[in-house]
Amino acid sequence: MKKTLITLLCVVLALTALTGCGEKGTTLKSVQNAGELVIASSPDFPPFESLNSDGSVDGIEIELCNLICEKLGVKLKIEQVDFDSVLPGVQAGKFNMGVSGISITEKRQKNVLFTDPYCLAAQAIVVTEGSPITCKADLEGKAVSVQTGTTAESYCMEQGYAVNSFAANSDAQAALTTGKVDAWVIDDLTAAEMVKAYNGDGNGTLVILPEAMTTEPYAFAFSFGSEELVKEINGILSELVADGTVQAIFDKFDAPYTSPAQA
Ligand code: ARG
């Protein structure tokens, strides 16, 4: 038994060394040596990251990442994954940085390292026009759609709503528009963007309720052991917040900016 355990431990250690996973983390030097910062992103989250028809990804966070990469002197490489694979992939060392409108939570802080937040968001309730749901209290006992692995999902579960989770945000939206659920819970700025696009297409009318739920700081995620690089990126982020660059990027995407200082 003891022997088996020791063998197993050796295998794990050897694998860890080979794959570079585990507590090692990402260093500034390793990123600069590679010449690129590999980020994991779920580009179904406008205005933070969305997929263009030519397959490229853009958005507020992509612009921020490009500026960060410029300062680090490396190229940006974007790996597209479902939202619920972003943090596990970062934690496992598959990607250098998680970039997906990720809210800092205590639970996530047990698994990954976050940069300082660069903005604040909230959860919004979206319903179809004429819905009897007009505020959060009306959600009691109702079916809601959310994206898998998000803070919307955990929040709605805690509240005891009947939660329907979808890997893609667009499917969570479709669950509402096709009448499978009573409401869709999603981060406020993305709700605004997706509802505007849907209503503009003349398909029907979705309404965002004025009562927002939660306050959530967005940040970028790293594996443990990346402290030095996170410190470097925090320095870059605080400069970009202080000199108005972050505000200007939000303006460019027509999105209202709430600085983390306004918490
Ligand atoms: N802010 C929420 C969270 O951290 C939702 C993020 C969803 N992001 C995405 N790219 N689809 O859970």
Image (cartoon, rainbow, N blue to C red):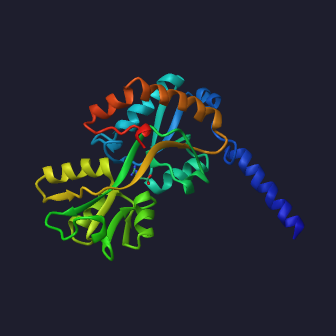
Residue shown at 58% from the left, 29% from the top: 232
Answer above or below: position of 72 versus 101.
above
Q: How many marks?
A: 0
Q: Which residue is outermost to the left?
A: 202
| Residue 80 seen in this snapshot | no
- Which of the image's four quarters has the N terminus? bottom right
Side of 141 relative to 104 (left or right): left
Residue shown at 53% from the left, 34% from the top: 37
Answer above or below: position of 218 versus 82.
above
Q: Which quadrant of the figure has residue 95? A: top right
Answer above or below: position of 189 versus 153.
above
| Residue 214 seen in this snapshot | yes
- Spot occupied by residue 155 in the image (x, y as percentages of width and height): 43, 63
- Spot occupied by residue 79 in the image (x, y as percentages of width and height): 46, 43
Residue shown at 48% from the left, 30% from the top: 237
- Spot occupied by residue 128 in the image (x, y as percentages of width and height): 18, 64
Side of 156 relative to 179 (left or right): right
Residues 211 and 128: in front is 211
Residue shown at 33% from the left, 61% from the top: 185
- Which of the image's four quarters has the C terminus? top left
Side of 73 relative to 63 (left or right): right
- Spot occupied by residue 169 in the image (x, y as percentages of width and height): 33, 57
Residues 213 and 154: in front is 213
Q: Which residue is outermost to the front?
A: 262
Side of 260 relative to 114 (left or right): left
